[in-house]
Image (spheres, helix red, strand yellow):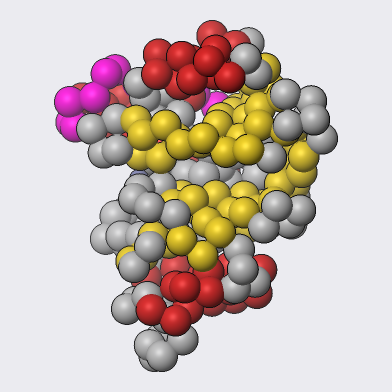
Amino acid sequence: MKVTLVPVTPFQQNCSIAVCESTRRAVVVDPGGDIERIIGEVERQGVTVEKILLTHGHLDHCGGAQALADYYGVKIEGPHRDDAFWIDQLAEQSKRFGFAAAQPFTPARWLAEGESVEFGGEALEVYHCPGHTPGHVVFFSRAHRLAFVGDVLFAGSIGRTDFPRGNHADLIRAIREKLWPLGDDVTFVPGHGPTSTFGAERRTNPYVGDGVSA
Ligand SMILES: [Zn+2]
Ligand SMILES: [Zn+2]
């Protein structure tokens, strides 16, 4: 699996294009906007987009999802159903933040803990990690030791929890009880900023590192 990051929206959100190298089939994770840039990168690589995956319902992660799904004629999978109230507010969110107009949608499939999503010959495990938003999910490739964590965890930081239905304790618990057990060697792509590994964050993250009490 090969992953290319395409920063999109004024929030520089890390939209990811993940490609199964044996089939040249791809998923787009979190197309928040600027879909012409995503389409350009997909064309440059000459891959076939099979589906769109969403970590959570925030505008900068899913604002371009329906337009991109329409363009490729593919389905949207994720996030967890508890983020429906965020997706329902996309039109207001895009107006408030001065983004291109985004319309609400209903994913073809809501995701839940323990499920998996497939594309090409790849499988991604789904972990429900509430806290930043109640319906946030993380996608994990066990074969490639790579996770797409959205706004749960960043290099040196964690997601904000001051939004409606945010919960700091839930977020910390999700990181420690669901992400850390996947392994210190796992590289993660956060929603914003540089990639890191779970092991590096356990050693140095000032919010959720092993030396920080809950
Ligand atoms: Zn977010
Ligand atoms: Zn974000």
Residue 134, visible in the rendered structure: no
| Quadrant into which the N terminus falls | top right
User: Could you tell me how many numbered marks the image carries?
Assistant: 0
Q: Which residue corresponds to the image point at 42% horizontal and 23% vertical from the top-left?
A: 64
Q: Which residue corresponds to the image point at 52% horizontal and 44% vertical from the top-left?
A: 55
In the displayed structure image, the side of residue 57 where residue 199 appears, left or right: right
Q: Is 100 colored magenta in this rendering?
A: yes
Residue 55, visible in the rendered structure: yes
Q: Is 53 colored magenta in this rendering?
A: no
Location of residue 121 by image quarter: top right
In the displayed structure image, the side of residue 180 where residue 160 appears, left or right: left
Q: Main secondary structure of the magenta part?
A: loop
The picture places residue 157, in percent across and down from the top left corner, at: 33, 66
| Quadrant into which the C terminus falls | bottom left
Up-down relation of residue 163 to residue 50 (above or below): below
The picture places residue 158, in percent across and down from the top left corner, at: 36, 65
Q: Return the residue nearer the eye: 199 or 126.
A: 199
Q: Which residue corresponds to the image point at 38% horizontal and 52% vertical from the top-left?
A: 194
The picture places residue 104, in percent across and down from the top left corner, at: 43, 24
In the displayed structure image, the side of residue 71 where residue 126 appears, left or right: right
Q: Return the residue nearer the eye: 66 or 202.
A: 202
Q: Which residue corresponds to the image point at 49% horizontal and 20% vertical from the top-left?
A: 41
Location of residue 28 by image quarter: top right
- Magenta stretch bounds: 96-106
